[in-house]
Image (tube, coloured by chain):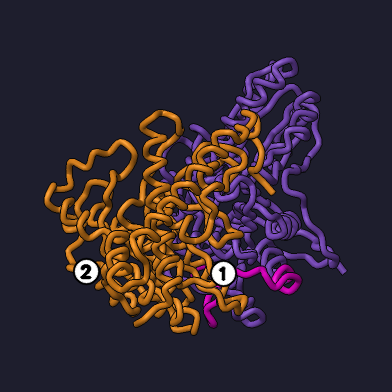
C-alpha cells in the first residue's frame, strides 16, 4: 500500500532502508542521533539512532573535521552520509569537499573510490544571511561531485537512495520549506511537497530531470522551492493563454540536457528560476550552454529569474523581495513572449 | 634495547634509499629534465623510516606535500614513484597526481594531501572505519609543524581523542613552515604540549634518531591498536634542503644549518653500526652502491616509459 509522506519522512525512510540493506552505510553529523534531540535540525534522522545506534554518529561542531573523516571512512569501504545542519555551514567544510573529496579519485589515477553522500538544507526562512543561502551553483564548477536537488518526497527518497548507492561523491540539496517537518520543528511558510511513496524499493536515477507540467510556449527550468512556485506561475499564465512547460531538473550535475533540449526545441523560449543569486548562478550555466547548443531553436534570449546579488536580508518584506515568487516568474515569461 | 643487525641494516638501507632518491631527483630537476615541482625529505629520513618500520602490512598512512620519504618507507617501489614524478601512465597515480599526491592505497598509503593539515581529518576517518569495522588496523598521520595551526588539525585530533580512534599523529617539526620559524607562530615550548588540550598523550623526541622514532612509534601504534586512542608524537628534525625546488633557504641561519648537518640521521646510524661492529665501511659502501643502482634503474625506466595521451586527462573522474 503506498503511503503519503513528507520529504523529511521520505528521507528518513531512505536512510533507514539503506542502513538496513547495507551495513556499510552510516550517518555522521551534528545533533542527528542525540536521544531526546531533534533528529537533525529538520527531523530527518529522528529516531534512527534507536535502530542503528552505532551508525548514527553525533559529532562536535567540526564540519571540516568530520567531512574529511567521511572521506577517510569512504576510502576504507564504508558509505558515509555526512550531514550539514544548515547548508550555509558547507563553507566550513569547503577545503575537504573541494580539494579532497572531489579530487581524491582523480588524483589517484582513478584507483580510489569515494562513495560519500553529503546532505545540506538550503533556502531562506527568516533566519538571516548565514542560515538562508542556496549554495548549489557554487558547486557546479567543482568537477568530481554529483549534485541533486529533490523537490518532492518521491524524488527525495529515490535520489537519496541513488546517492547512497552511487560510488561517487554526491551532494544532496534539500529545501527547508519543503521538508514538511512536524511539531516543534515545523517551518512557517512550509509548502506541501508530499507524495505517495510506493512500498517497493525504488531509486530515481541521478542525471534525469522530469517534466512537471507540459506546455508549448515556454520552457521554465526551476529547482527546489522555485519549482513549486513555477507551477503556480504556470497556472496564472494558463489563464492568460500562455502554455508553460515546467521542468524540474532534479540533478544539477549531471544535468539532463537531453530532456531540456527536447523541450526547448518545442517551445523555443526558456526561463530559468533559482533562489540563489543571479550572478554565476544555475541559470547562467543553463543560458550559456543553451546559447551554444540551441541557438538555431531559440527565438528569444534565455531569461534568468534569480535573487538579487545581495546576502539574504532578514526583515520579511525584504526577504520576500529577495526570493523570486510566482508573479516574478510569470512576468519573466511574459517579457519574452511577443505581443504580451 | 638491542636489535637484530639485519633490522638496523634495513633501517639504514631504507633511509639511504630515500636520501639517494631525493638527491637524484634534485639533479634531474636542476637539469630541466623532470617536470613539475618537488618538496624534498632530505634530513628527515629517520622519521618516515622509524615510524613505518613499526607498521603492519594493512595499516594505512596519510602524508603531505613532502611525501617521497613516506612513500619509500611505506613500501611503494622507487620505480612507481619515479614514474609518477615523470608524469608517466605507469606511475603510482597514472600520472594524474604528481609529486604532491604520491600514494598507493594498496600499499597502505593514501595519495598525499597537499593542503597543509588536510590529511589529519582523513587519517582520523580511516581510523573511524577501522573501529567501526572492528579491524585491528591503525592509521598514522604525518604532518609538519605548520599543520598544527590549521583548524582541521584541531577538529580532527579532538575527534580522534573523544572516540579513542586507532590513529597516531606524527608531527615532523623541522622548525620551519615554508620559511616561517615555528617559534614565531606558536606560543608553547613544545608542540606535543597541545596533546593535553585533547586529553591524549603527547611526546617530543629526537626525530633524527631512527631507533628512538621506531620505539616511540611502536608504543603509540600498539596503544592505538589496543583501543587506547591516539598519541601525538612530535619528532624534532631539520630540513637539509629547500622547502621546494627553488628555495635557497636564506631564512635558515648558517650555523643552525651546519649544526643540523652534523646531527643528520643517516650519519648517526652509520656511526652506531660501525662502532658496534654491526657493519663495516665496506658493507655501508656496498649498500650505497645498491641504492644508487636501484634509483638509477628507476630513472632509466621512467624516462623510457610512455607518456599519457593528452585526452587521457578526461578519464578517471567518476566510478
Residue at 53% over, 82% down: A36
Point out residue A289 in the picture as x, y percentages from the top left corner. Answer: 64, 26
- Depth check, mark 2 against mark 1: the one in front is 1
B146 is higher (above) or lower (below) than B126: above
Of B53 and A273, the residue lying toward us: B53
How would you rate the neighbour count of disc 1 (Cα within 10 Å): few for under 14, some for 14-19, many for 20 or more? few
Left or right of A206 on screen, residue B169: left
Of B120 and A193, the residue lying toward us: B120
Chain A: its colour in the image is purple
Of B313 and B244, the residue lying toward us: B244
Q: Which residue is mark 2?
A: B190
Q: Quadrant of residue B215?
A: bottom left
Chain of the residue under label 2:
B
Chain B: its colour in the image is orange
- Residue A127 in sight here: no
Label 1's element?
loop
- Is A263 inside the magenta-drawn segment? no
**Disc number for residue B110:** none
Q: Which residues are magenta?
A: A17-37
Instruction: Work out whether disc 2 and disc 1 sit on a shared chain.
Output: yes
Chain of the residue under label 1:
B
Quadrant of the image for the N terminus of chain B? bottom left
Residue at 41% over, 65% down: B11
Point out residue B81 in the picture as x, y percentages from the top left corner. Answer: 52, 47
Of B142 and B28, the residue lying toward us: B28
Q: Which residue is mark 1?
A: B57
Residue at 62% over, 70% down: A26
Point out residue A304 in the picture as x, y percentages from the top left corner. Answer: 58, 30
Label 2's element?
loop
- Is A36 inside the magenta-drawn segment? yes
Between the C-alphas of marks 2 and 1, the distance is 32 Å
Amino acid at each position: 500500500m503506498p503511503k503519503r509522506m513528507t520529504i523529511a519522512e521520505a528521507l528518513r525512510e531512505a536512510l533507514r532502508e539503506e542502513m538496513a540493506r547495507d551495513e556499510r552505510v552510516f550517518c555522521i553529523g551534528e545533533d542527528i542521533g542525540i536521544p531526546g534531540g531533534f533528529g537533525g535540525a529538520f527531523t530527518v534522522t529522528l529516531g534512527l539512532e534507536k535502530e542503528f545506534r552505532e551508525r548514527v554518529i553525533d559529532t562536535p561542531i567540526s564540519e571540516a573535521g568530520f567531512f574529511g573523516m567521511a572521506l577517510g571512512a569512504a576510502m576504507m569501504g564504508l558509505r558515509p552520509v555526512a550531514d550539514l545542519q544548515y547548508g550555509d555551514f558547507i563553507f566550513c567544510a569547503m577545503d575537504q569537499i573541494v580539494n579532497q573529496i572531489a579530487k581524491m579519485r582523480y588524483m589517484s589515477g582513478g584507483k580510489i573510490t569515494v562513495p560519500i553522500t553529503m546532505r545540506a538544507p538550503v533556502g531562506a526562512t527568516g533566519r538571516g544571511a548565514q542560515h538562508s543561502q542556496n549554495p548549489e551553483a557554487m558547486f557546479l564548477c567543482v568537477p568530481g561531485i554529483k549534485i541533486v536537488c529533490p523537490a518532492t518526497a518521491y524524488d527525495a527518497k529515490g535520489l537519496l537512495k541513488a546517492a547512497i548507492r552511487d560510488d561517487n561523491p554526491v551532494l544532496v540539496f534539500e529545501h527547508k520549506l519543503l521538508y514538511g517537518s512536524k511539531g516543534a520543528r515545523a517551518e512557517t511558510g512550509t509548502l506541501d511537497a508530499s507524495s505517495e511513496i510506493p512500498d517497493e524499493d525504488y531509486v530515481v536515477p541521478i542525471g534525469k530531470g522530469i517534466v512537471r507540467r507540459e506546455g508549448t510556449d515556454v520552457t521554465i527550468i526551476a529547482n527546489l522551492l522555485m519549482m513549486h512556485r513555477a507551477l503556480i506561475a504556470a497556472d496564472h499564465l494558463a489563464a492568460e493563454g500562455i502554455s508553460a512547460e515546467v521542468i524540474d531538473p532534479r540533478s544539477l550535475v549531471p544535468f539532463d540536457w537531453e530532456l531540456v533540449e527536447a523541450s526547448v526545441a518545442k517551445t523555443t523560449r526558456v526561463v530559468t528560476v533559482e533562489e540563489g543569486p543571479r550572478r554565476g548562478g544555475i541559470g547562467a550555466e543553463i543560458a550559456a550552454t543553451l546559447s551554444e547548443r540551441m541557438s538555431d531553436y531559440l527565438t528569444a534570449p534565455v531569461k534568468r529569474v534569480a535573487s538579487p546579488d545581495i546576502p539574504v536580508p532578514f526583515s520579511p518584506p525584504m526577504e520576500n523581495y529577495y526570493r523570486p515568487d510566482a508573479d516574478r516568474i510569470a512576468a519573466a515569461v511574459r517579457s519574452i513572449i511577443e505581443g504580451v | 634495547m638491542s636489535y637484530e643487525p639485519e633490522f638496523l641494516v634495513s633501517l639504514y638501507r631504507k633511509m639511504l634509499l630515500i636520501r639517494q632518491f631525493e638527491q637524484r631527483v634534485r639533479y634531474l630537476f636542476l637539469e630541466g629534465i623532470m617536470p613539475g615541482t618537488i618538496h624534498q625529505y632530505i634530513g628527515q629520513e629517520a622519521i618516515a623510516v622509524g615510524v613505518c618500520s613499526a607498521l603492519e602490512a594493512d595499516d594505512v598512512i596519510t602524508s603531505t606535500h613532502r611525501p617521497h620519504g613516506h612513500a619509500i618507507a611505506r613500501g611503494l617501489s622507487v620505480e612507481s614513484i619515479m614514474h609518477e614524478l615523470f608524469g608517466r601512465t605507469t606511475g603510482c597515480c597514472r600520472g594524474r597526481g604528481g609529486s604532491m599526491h604520491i600514494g598507493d592505497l594498496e600499499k597502505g598509503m593514501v595519495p598525499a594531501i597537499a593542503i597543509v593539515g588536510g590529511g589529519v581529518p582523513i587519517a582520523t576517518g580511516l581510523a573511524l572505519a577501522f573501529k567501526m569495522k572492528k579491524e585491528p588496523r591503525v592509521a598514522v598521520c604525518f604532518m609538519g609543524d605548520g599543520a598544527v595551526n590549521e583548524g582541521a588539525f584541531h577538529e580532527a585530533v579532538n575527534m580522534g581523542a573523544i572516540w579513542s580512534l586507532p590513529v597516531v599523529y606524527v608531527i615532523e617539526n623541522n622548525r620551519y613552515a615554508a620559511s616561517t620559524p615555528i617559534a614565531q607562530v606558536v606560543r608553547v615550548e613544545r608542540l606535543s604540549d597541545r596533546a593535553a588540550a585533547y586529553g591524549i598523550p603527547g611526546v617530543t623526541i629526537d626525530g633524527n634518531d631512527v631507533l628512538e622514532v621506531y620505539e616511540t612509534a611502536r608504543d603509540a601504534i600498539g596503544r592505538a591498536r589496543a583501543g587506547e586512542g591516539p598519541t601525538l608524537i612530535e619528532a624534532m628534525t631539520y630540513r637539509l634542503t629547500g622547502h621546494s625546488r627553488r628555495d635557497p633557504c636564506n631564512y635558515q641561519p648558517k650555523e643552525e644549518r651546519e649544526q643540523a648537518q652534523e646531527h643528520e640521521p643517516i650519519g648517526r646510524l652509520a656511526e652506531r653500526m660501525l662502532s658496534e661492529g654491526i657493519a663495516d665501511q665496506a658493507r655501508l659502501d656496498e649498500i650505497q652502491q645498491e641504492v644508487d643502482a636501484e634509483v638509477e634503474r628507476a630513472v632509466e625506466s621512467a624516462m623510457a616509459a610512455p607518456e599519457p595521451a593528452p585526452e587521457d586527462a578526461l578519464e578517471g573522474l567518476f566510478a
